[in-house]
Amino acid sequence: MKPPSSSLALGLLSSSALTAAVRLPFQRRTTIHAGSISGISGTPDSSTTLLSAGTGASNDSDITNSNNVFYSTNLTMGGTEVPLQLDTGSADLWVYPEAYPGIFANVHNFSDVPVGVRYGKGSVDGHVAVTNVSFAGFGVDDQAFIAVTVAKDMDSLLKRGAYGIIGLGADDLSRVNEAVQNKYNATWGRTLLSNLFLQEPNTPNHVAFALDRAGDLDDTATGSFDIGEIQPQYAAIEQSSPIPLWPETANRWTVLIDSLTANGSSVPLNSTFEGDNGIEPPAGKSLALLDTGTSLALIPKWAVDAIYESIPGSAYSAQDDVWFVPCMAEGVVSFVIGGITIPIHPLDLTIPQTYINSSGEKVTYCVNTFRPFTLDFNAFDFLLGDSFLRNVYAVYDFGDFDSSGNMGKPYVKLLPLTDPTAASAGFKKSRAAALSQLPPEGSFEGLVGVSIPTPNSSVAGSGIGSGKSGSNLAAAGLSDDDTSSIKDSLSQLTKFAPIVLALLGINAILLIGLVTMGAFTLFKRNKSNKTVAGASSGTRGAYAPVIKFPEDDDRSHTPTGRYDTPQYT
């Protein structure tokens, strides 16, 4: 590694703290709140439960599952442990010192090298800094990172106790690495993982995740995060074929989706991606990013509608682009990637939410966790986040070093973890147990704002090629603030529903009068026995209320995207 200046006395990378491989078990952090849809604030349950996933492992090395919102671990910086999110969708290490005043006191600051990251929701800005860090039993001297001075709209991360991100992507996706190269024509801005693997060339250059599933009263933590190691129970993945990144020059963990099936029906795939020299995915395939930094899955609207309109009893809110699904209804969904069929657990397709309706009654609704992709770029078609990744053991391999020290091409491997039969039985038991401790499920019938598809009909605005709707959720992330606009809109709709209905009634009377007058006029003018043809009622389904998402209710959080989705360019 070439230091920026000999006077800075930045040493070479240290290998003293390395181990050949490491596995981190999971902890689970679960917080349950009550919420409101009528403008009445709920009273949060302040209790927080931590369930250790392993024995003999210190809490310092555990991976924490924050209620399926994000997965984090501790990184030690200058002797201070800081919880940071693990994110395969980005490459930079950044830390915000809000809860750790003085943490940057002993780092080497490059204040003249500003760097920032813009996300789909929120942003961070700061400058390049260098310090010694340790992570998962590995130590790196002089690791470059972003010393964040301004964090905008990142409360969802900060309020849940994580103060930065460990990006697990490639060097050429790193803003820090780019800034250092531009300023010093040097390589010391490499990512944390790149430095770890360079220190130990005999260690397999991969990380692997089995993401634990929290919620719905499932109290067992079974996930793991591995560096350079494959867990024995997932050894079958070593016999599976590597799935190459696409395109070949990709600097993200992007792969082709071969097919998508929803409740027995094939969903036709397409792609809007266009790479260098006009390269496009093969016909009938879509491009997907595998991203642990996204809590849900963000997919094209036509794919969302195909999945959820096929579930009997489902209802669609055009206002907020949200699907409401009977809580005990099971969707049967599977993806094929690299020739491997990956079934999705029913628990990962919907999430129960608790609300207070306009009558002051607590009700429960279940909503979709595969949400429309509304971010404005075409670097990929599907952003497959944690609701997808909990169904696989995923190995992200940067490529092994050859005898000349050159790194091979990166690839991924995926091992399906969800058995459909066992998942169905587990869903029934777990969801029923969860619902038994929640308010009764709300009805969609006879209420305003949500259409219920009928057989042989489709939801308005759905279908292949449909654009994004004007949803309040379009740019929402995981933050409580993000859901406030939804709450306001939905609260107003609920509050003024009687007035709206009254006005609709008056309009209907006026319309009938106008139609009658028109018919009479035509009758007189034509002096015939023609009658005025009535409009067909069609099959639009019943209607249900648009439901808002309580600001202080983690259990009622239904984020449509990640708060930290980079604006890929």
Image: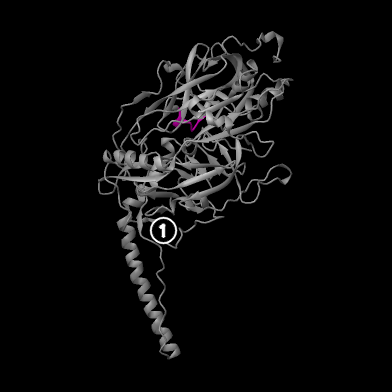
Does the image show residue 563?
Answer: no
Side of 302 relative to 2 (left or right): left
Toward which corner of the image does residue 502 lie, by quadrant?
A: bottom left
Tell me where residue 64 appears, x and y as whole percent. Answer: 43, 25
Q: How many discs appear?
A: 1
Is 126 inside the magenta-drawn segment? no
Does the image show residue 491?
Answer: yes
Pick the quarter of the image with the C terminus.
Answer: top right
Pick the quarter of the image with the N terminus.
Answer: top right
Neighbourhood count class around disc 1 (C-alpha, 10 Å): few under 14, some 14–19, many 20 upward: many
Tag 1: amino acid: Pro
Q: In this view, does 332 lie above or below 226?
A: below
Is 155 inside the magenta-drawn segment? yes
Which residue is at 61% across, 39% downward? Answer: 255
Tell me where residue 101 appears, x and y as whole percent. Answer: 47, 16
Toward which corner of the image does residue 40 lie, by quadrant?
A: top left
Mark 1, residue position: 453
Side of 30 relative to 70 (left or right): left
What range of the chain is rendered magenta? 151-157
The image's colouring method is one colour
Which residue is at 53% across, 31% downward? Answer: 236
Secondary structure beneath label 1: loop
Tell me where residue 490 appears, x and y as whole percent. Answer: 37, 48
